Image (spheres, grey):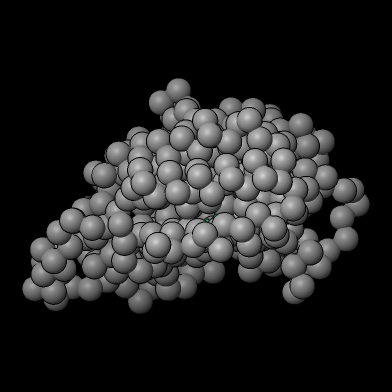
Amino acid sequence: MHELELFSAVKANAGLDFLSPLHKVLTSHWYVMGNEVRSFENEFADYLGVNHCISVANGSDALELALKALNVQAGARVVTAANAGFYASSAIYAIGATPVYIDVDAATLTLCPKALAAVLDSSIAAVIVTHLYGQLADMEEIVRLSSAAGIPVLEDCAQAHGARRNGKPAGSFGAIACFSFYPTKNLGALGDGGAMVTDNHDMAARIRQLRQYGWGQKYQVTLAGGRNSRMDEIQAAILRIKLPYLDQWNEQRRFIAKRYNEAFFKFNVLLPCSMAADYVAHLYVMRLANRRQFINVLKQKGIKTDIHYPIPDYRQAAYIAELPYALTVTEHACETVVSLPCYPGLTGDEADRVITAVTAYFEQEG
Ligand SMILES: *Cc1c(COP(=O)(O)O)cnc(C)c1O
């Protein structure tokens, strides 16, 4: 039996015509930030219903430049969760700011509004919310609390392209939002790519400068802190081909996740809590005891799993930090999470194989 990958960006790409857009770019002889990039930015902004989309080289650059666009200075304090793979922390450290880690909600594993309310004061410069695994965080409450304190919210939507609550998409709640188009994301290029979206005209103008040397016009540096972070024409052309399929691919992901939830709810595991439009099943993550044993049993049956993510940000070897309080949900999540294969193109038979293997495990292990 063939091995089941955890991710397969290849399957969603199958059958799409990528040669025509490649040919178009090759014959245009314009390779970086041209018409394809401009068109993709407009189309993605329209898809999200926001005023501006500014593309960059990858999602990590987007987070870092977004903090700069929000005017977060070196030495500032930025609230974030510690269970989301260190991407937000990496951007916070890159600009010389300090992360303030708070706990996540036990059901969604996204930033807990109650924990946020407890730390929000005038020392906080921004809040970064990650819509982890494709689950939209409680943005209504987080934005309400933050706005009342005059603090901007940055959404990390790198796992949540197309997630919506009451029709309102991830990326349209905060002051600014960041996306990654890494190949395995819900909307993925054939290489690296990223973007920021915002409704604010001034902020959009600052970001356009920050991604290209701080230039106001060619060779005139009028904004400090700029550098080079641009999207290729080829990647933008590919993303334009793929964007119209995003909603149906998310539907396919959610369909697989629903089948898993229906099959596993009777076992002693914690499952993704929403199967509605606010969850786009970037990852299907269960929480269970004896994770090692579970992973080994599935591996023997040719099913790959992974752990998103095993180490809380404040325990990463290069950035060990003592917290003044324990983040109990975060700690427990890092010890118990396991991701199962869930992506568009995973066939019904393949999902059955996962269900059979997981069911057999729990029926034996109790
Ligand atoms: C993938 C990811 C990023 C980083 O994106 P890159 O394009 O790989 O730099 C940031 N945040 C989250 C939540 C991600 O999943």
Point out residue 267 in the picture as x, y percentages from the top left corner.
66, 35
Q: Is residue 67 visible?
A: no
Q: Nearer the viewer, residue 175 or 282?
A: 282
Image quadrant in which the N terminus is located: bottom left
Q: Is residue 236 above or below residue 134?
A: below
Q: Residue furthest right?
A: 324
Q: Is residue 20 visible?
A: yes
Q: Nearer the viewer, residue 193 or 10?
A: 10
Q: Nearer the viewer, residue 353 or 181?
A: 353
Residue occupying the point 65% across, 54% down: 294
Residue occupying the point 44% across, 30% down: 277
Q: Nearer the viewer, residue 173 or 237?
A: 237
Image quadrant in which the C terminus is located: top right
Point out residue 63 in the picture as x, y percentages from the top left corner.
54, 58
Q: Quadrant of residue 138?
A: top right
**Total numbered circles:** 0
Point out residue 300 in the picture as x, y percentages from the top left corner.
56, 63
Point out residue 86 in the picture as x, y percentages from the top left corner.
65, 61
Relative to 324, 148 lies left or right: left
Residue occupying the point 42% across, 55% down: 185
